[in-house]
Image (cartoon, coloured by chain):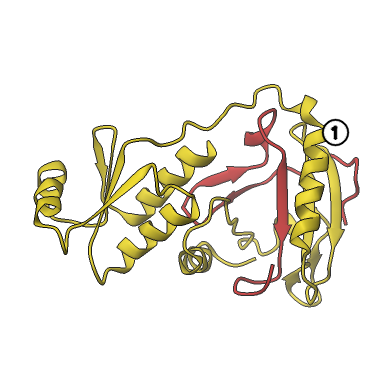
Chain colours: A yellow, B red
Amino acid sequence: MDSVHCHANWAAGMGGISFPLLADFHPKGAVAGAYGLYLAEKGITDRATVIIDADGVVRHASSVTPAGSRDIAELAALCEAVNRNHSGTLPAAEAPPGITGATLFVKNGCGFSRTALLARTNLHLEAAVQVKNVSDDPAALAELEQLAGKAQAPALALGGSVQLESVDIVRTLVSKTTGF
Amino acid sequence: MIQVGDRAPDFKLADHLGRQVSLAQFRGTRHVMLLFYPLDFTPT
């Protein structure tokens, strides 16, 4: 229901998330409406959960009302039930590529570096993505300058290429980890 | 509210990383859980 910008801010505040936060914002609530979950009189979306199998068929739909809260253990059980009962709809499922041998260059006092670091933590990539702090480590700074052609951090070095924008870094970490 | 057994309406929306995400792109490869919520910065 919020805009892309609000979502980006929220996601950064939570430290990066592995699932897409979708902006059902323009026209407002159009997708929620298609699912019968837009509360037009309040101008908000219901707090509801819909699980769809890989054939596009709804396998679960429930609401806890906007003021309610979801039971995370129950959601996990619902997911497991769909996995168990509808795995036949997943013929083309492939494991995500994953990440190995990446280096994340960061600097102190930098919100963009913090965002990239939090995404690494949240995606459980501590072992796969080595961190080098260019504020504390002259050798790391020299390495960054050689790889990127400039002393800009954060930077993600992976497979011979370097990314210098935190949103690109997070997108790469997410897509390699999740497969999309 | 949509019912179990219904065909889920397709959608294509921008996500927080600037990607266009559709339901159709997961056909045959993923189950999808949609978590609708009223506003950012509210509980799960």
Which residue is drawn at the image coordinates 11% and 49% (left, top)? Answer: A145
Q: Mark 1 is on which residue type?
A: Asn
Location of residue A108 (image quadrant): bottom left
| Residue found at x 38% / y 62% | A115
| Depth order, front residue of A29/A99 | A99
**For residue A60, above or below residue A108:** above
Q: Mark 1 lies on which chain?
A: A
- Choose between A126 and B40: the one closer to the eye: A126
Residue pictured at 32% horizontal, 36% vertical? A101
Determine whether B42 is above or below A156 in the image.
below
Q: Is residue B22 left or right of residue A169?
A: right
Residue A69 appears at what percent x and percent y?
Answer: 77, 70
- Quadrant in which residue A129 is drawn: top left
**Badge 1 density bin: few <14, some 14–19, many ≥20, Cα 10 Å:** few
- The residue lying at 80 percent from left, 73 percent from top is A68
Left or right: A156 as drawn, with respect to A10: left
Image x and y of residue A36, in percent: 84, 58
Question: Is residue B8 in view from this perspective?
Answer: no
Note whether A76 is above or below A89 in the view shown: below
- Between residues A58 and A1, which one lies in front from this camera angle? A58
Residue at mark 1: A85
Seen as rendered, the residue at the extreme front is: A127
Please state, as top left, top right, bottom left or bottom right, where the N terminus of chain A lies in the image.
bottom right
Res A100 quadrant in image: top left
